Image (cartoon, helix red, strand yellow):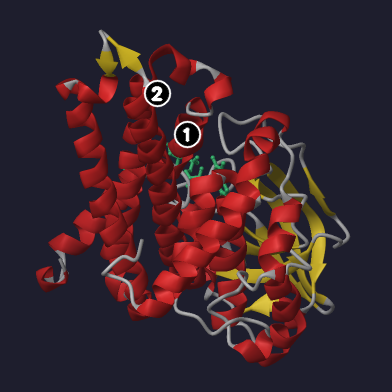
Amino acid sequence: MALSILNEEENAIRDAIFELVQGTIAKRSQEFDQKAIFPRENMELLGRQGYLGMIVDPKWGGAGASYLAQTLVVEAIAAADPATAVIYEVHNSLHIEGIWRFGTEEQKSRYLPGLCQGESIGAFAITEAESGSNAASMQTRAVRLADGYHLTGRKMFITSGGEADRYIVFATLDPALKEKGITAFIVPKTAKGLRFGPPEDKLGIRASRTSEMILDDVVVPVEDRLGEEGQGYYIALYLLDGGRIGIAAQSVGIMTTALERSLAYARQRKQFGQAIGQFEGIQWRLADMATDLHAARLMTYEAARRREEGPAQRPLFAMAKLFASEKAVQHAADAIQIFGGYGYMREYGVERLLRDAKVTEIYEGTSEIMRLVIASRLLKEYDLGNI
Ligand SMILES: Cc1cc2nc3c(=O)[nH]c(=O)nc-3n(C[C@H](O)[C@H](O)[C@H](O)COP(=O)(O)OP(=O)(O)OC[C@H]3O[C@@H](n4cnc5c(N)ncnc54)[C@H](O)[C@@H]3O)c2cc1C
């Protein structure tokens, strides 16, 4: 059904992507989760159908679409398969967008067409074992020599690590410079000295691969530095602003499925001679889930519409992620409760919602960091007219 807060074109995109993913990606998502199969075929499908790099100018292979259009796609994919949603989100918001906004013309023409068509998958590597929330404390070093930059260090928890064809890697020219030393590089999977740890054995989004990345004197030519020396921290935070809108959308997708499955079950499951949906205890839970979903969706769409305002609206992006991710975890648990014992069983696919939802409160900035971002700006100069 058309949403009044979207225009005609946005509603058309929303309908088309929901139909596509329900007829394709949704069908194998349970199997991919159970066998931890990396869903490369889903990325290829999305590329063929024109859903990768949507915000990129058509001259580089994109669709020239709005940020909101891309956000609607993340939401629809997540409703079917949250693991594919995060691969998609990292590929688009953290990798393609990095090259699109900060790359040279030469980098754009070399990399964007293949990324937009699904011929190659992109990833993003900033986290390290001792540097998570405090990304500025990273230790991966970049040393400039005659043949380019030599990168040495280890990155943790890289989404699509070992599967992606190319990585935006952040390294410091000098740890003493903190944020000001951080520089971004485009590194191919095939680079000499680059290797990956085995896939992490995770609670949820099991079809998405998460791996350690080891850089042992990897040479990156100067042409593959992304942005200027020392601009990396700004680039990372700029991209994570968009990434957080994507994770909010992923959370909204999970909430949508939690509510749909709960409503269907509440209508058909009978106890004490009537459908459990007739009990007030169940009704209140459903009403709260619908209300939260509506609020999270509005916050996410508003954040997406204001993406182009950049870091000035960082608190809005953080609020959308904070609210949507925490509600997604709560709703996934609610759905299990409504399903009773059946909800706890793999076969019904509702327990997966909770396993998949939990990470939305952690990656691309934890809930605690989202609260820090919001509060620190509120206490400084943030215009309350925005909220
Ligand atoms: C499945 C998965 C995929 C990921 N994909 C990627 C990826 O593709 N690329 C990438 O670079 N990274 C990725 N990450 C890393 C992710 O972004 C980090 O795990 C996250 O930023 C948190 O860092 P940390 O795990 O080191 O936790 P820490 O920073 O050590 O935090 C531990 C706890 O302390 C809290 N905390 C920390 N600082 C503060 C503070 N100042 N105030 C209050 N509380 C605080 C945190 O909120 C958290 O609860 C991924 C992680 C996971 C789990």
Density class for disc 2 (Cα within 10 Å; few <14, some 14-19, many ≥20) is many
Q: Earlier in the sequence, mark 1 or mark 2?
A: 2
Residue drawn 23% across the image and 53% down it: 295
Is residue 308 or residue 22 the one in the foreground? Answer: 22
SS type, badge 1: helix
Three-letter residue code for mark 2: Ile
| Residue toward you, 273 or 181 | 273
Residue at the outermost front position: 273
Report the residue marked by disc 1.
353
User: In which quarter of the view is residue 94 placed?
Assistant: bottom right
Estimate the x, y position of residue 301 in percent, counting from the top left: 33, 65
- Give x and y (percent) for residue 84: 61, 50
The reply to whether residue 86 is visible in this rendering is yes
Residue at x-position 40% and y-position 70% = 11
Question: Do the CB atoms of the residues marked 1 and 2 lie less than 8 Å apart?
Answer: yes
CA–CA distance in space, label 1 to label 2 = 9 Å
- Decide if residue 5 is on the left or right side of residue 86: left
Q: Residue 272's x, y, as percent?
A: 25, 8
Quarter of the image where the N terminus is located:
bottom left
Instruction: Classify residue 202 as left or right of residue 321.
Output: right
Q: Position of residue 210 (x, y in %)?
A: 66, 42
Observer able to see residue 177: no
Compared with 200, 163 (above or below) is below
- Type of residue at label 1? Leu
Name the residue: 43% across, 49% down: 253
Task: Please tell me the numbered disc located at residue 62.
Answer: none
Query: 259 or 236: nearer the eye?
Result: 259
- In the figure, residue 4 lies in which quadrant? bottom left
Provide the secondary structure element on which disc 2 rests.
Answer: helix
Q: Which residue is mark 2?
A: 336
Say which residue appears at 72% left-offset and 89% top-offset.
106
